[in-house]
Image (cartoon, rainbow, N blue to C red):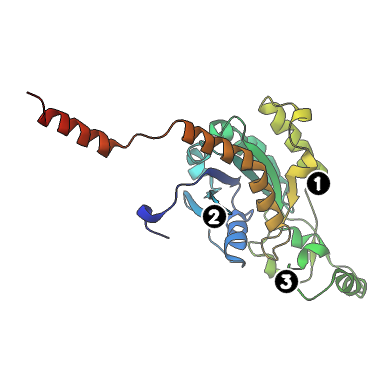
C-alpha cells in the first residue's frame, strides 16, 4: 500500500456490505487485480483507492462477521454508494442484508446510491461460468451443457462452499431470484424515504456477478462509478467555492504581525 503522505484524497467512497462468505473481498480483488483469490474472512475493514479517469474512488471492504458488526456504520459514514452483497445460493444471506446491514447505512450520504449484488452466479448460471477473456463462446458452452446425459443438481445447503471451484461443472440450486433482489431494493427505498419514481430503476441497480470468472464484475463497479459522478462534481465545486485554509500560512502571518507590533 502506498505511503499515506503520497496517497491521493478520494473524491467519493464506495462501501461493500454483506454477510461473511458472500464474496465481498473476492469481488474487490477481481475488479482491482483482475484475478480470483481464495480469501480469508476480512477483519474490521480494508480499502482500495481506485483511479477512475481524473477521479479517485475509495472502495471499502467490510467484515461480515457479527463481532465486527458495530464497525459497519463507521465505514459507511459519508458513503456515496453502498454495494449490498449476498450469495445467490444462500437465501439467508439476502435476509441478513435487511435484518443486520441496512441500518448501518444510516450514516451514508442522504443521496447515497444502493446496489443489490448476488455473487457466486457461476454456481447456478452456465453463462456466468465463462470468464470475460475466455475463448469459449456462449454457443459452445450451451453445446457442452446439452451433451450432458444427466443433469447434476445438488440440493441447496444453508452454507454454500467456501470456494466455487470445489464442485467443478456442477450446478447448485439458486435460492435467490432476481425478483427477490428487486423486491429488496424497493424496501430499501421505502426505508430511506425515497420515491421509486424519482430513484434509479431496480433493474439498473440489481446485479448478479461471479468473482471467480469475472462475470458482470466490471459492469457493477463501472455502472456505480458513472452514477456517483454527479456527487463527485458537486463536491469538487463546493471545495472550489470554499477553499481550505492553510494553517501554516496563518501561523506565519501571526508571527510576522507580532514581530512588527510596537
Q: CA distance from mark 2 to mark 1?
A: 29 Å
Marks 1 and 3: CB-CB under 8 Å? no
Q: Nearer the viewer, mark 3 or mark 2?
A: 2
Callout 1 crowding tier (Cα within 10 Å): few <14, some 14–19, many ≥20 = some
**In the image, is residue 13 above or below residue 157?**
above
Q: CA distance from mark 1 to mark 3?
A: 26 Å
Query: Residue 101: x percent and y percent?
Result: 60, 38
Q: Is residue 95 visible?
A: yes
Residue at 75% x, 58% y is 121
Image quadrant containing the C terminus: top left
* Image-quadrant location for residue 242: top left
Q: Which residue is mark 1?
A: 178
Looking at this view, is 137 or 71 the one in front? Answer: 137
Q: Which residue is mark 2?
A: 50
Query: Residue 1: x percent and y percent?
Result: 43, 60
Q: Earlier in the sequence, mark 1 or mark 3?
A: 3
Q: Nearer the viewer, mark 1 or mark 3?
A: 3
Q: Earlier in the sequence, mark 3 or mark 2?
A: 2
**Helix, strand or loop at mark 2:** strand
**For residue 133, which numbered disc appears in the image?**
3
* Image-quadrant location for residue 183: top right
Farthest left residue?
262
> Would you say 55 lies left or right of 220 here?
left
Q: Earlier in the sequence, mark 2 or mark 1?
A: 2
> Would you say 65 lies left or right of 183 here?
left
> Would you say 57 lies left or right of 145 here?
left
Residue at 61% x, 41% y is 81
Residue at 62% x, 62% y is 30
**Helix, strand or loop at mark 1:** helix
**In the image, is residue 194 above or below residue 17?**
above
Amino acid at each position: 500500500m502506498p505511503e499515506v503522505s503520497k496517497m491521493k484524497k478520494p473524491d467519493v467512497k464506495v462501501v461493500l456490505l454483506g454477510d461473511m462468505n458472500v464474496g465481498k473481498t473476492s469481488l474487490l480483488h477481481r475488479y482491482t487485480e483482475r484475478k480470483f483469490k481464495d480469501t480469508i474472512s476480512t477483519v474490521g475493514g480494508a480499502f482500495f483507492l481506485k483511479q477512475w479517469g481524473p477521479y479517485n474512488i475509495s472502495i471499502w471492504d467490510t467484515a461480515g462477521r457479527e463481532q465486527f458488526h458495530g464497525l459497519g456504520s463507521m465505514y459507511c459514514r459519508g458513503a456515496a454508494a453502498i454495494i449490498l452483497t449476498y450469495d445467490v445460493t444462500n437465501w439467508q444471506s439476502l435476509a441478513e442484508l435487511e435484518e443486520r446491514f441496512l441500518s448501518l447505512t444510516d450514516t451514508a450520504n442522504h443521496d447515497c446510491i444502493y446496489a443489490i449484488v448476488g455473487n457466486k452466479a457461476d454456481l447456478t448460471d452456465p453463462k456466468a461460468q465463462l470468464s470475460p477473456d475466455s475463448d469459449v463462446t456462449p454457443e459452445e458452452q450451451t453445446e457442452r451443457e446439452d451433451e450432458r446425459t444427466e443433469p447434476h443438481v445438488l440440493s441447496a445447503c444453508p452454507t454454500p462452499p467456501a470456494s466455487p471451484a470445489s464442485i467443478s461443472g456442477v450446478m447448485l440450486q439458486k435460492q435467490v431470484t432476481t425478483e427477490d433482489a428487486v423486491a429488496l431494493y424497493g424496501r430499501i427505498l421505502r426505508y430511506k424515504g425515497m420515491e421509486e419514481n424519482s430513484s434509479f430503476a431496480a433493474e439498473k441497480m440489481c446485479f448478479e456477478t461471479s468473482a471467480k470468472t469475472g462475470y458482470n464484475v466490471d459492469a457493477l463497479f463501472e455502472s456505480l462509478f458513472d452514477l456517483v459522478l454527479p456527487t463527485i462534481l458537486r463536491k469538487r465545486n463546493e471545495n472550489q467555492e470554499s477553499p481550505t485554509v492553510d494553517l501554516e500560512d496563518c501561523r506565519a502571518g501571526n508571527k510576522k504581525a507580532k514581530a512588527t507590533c510596537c
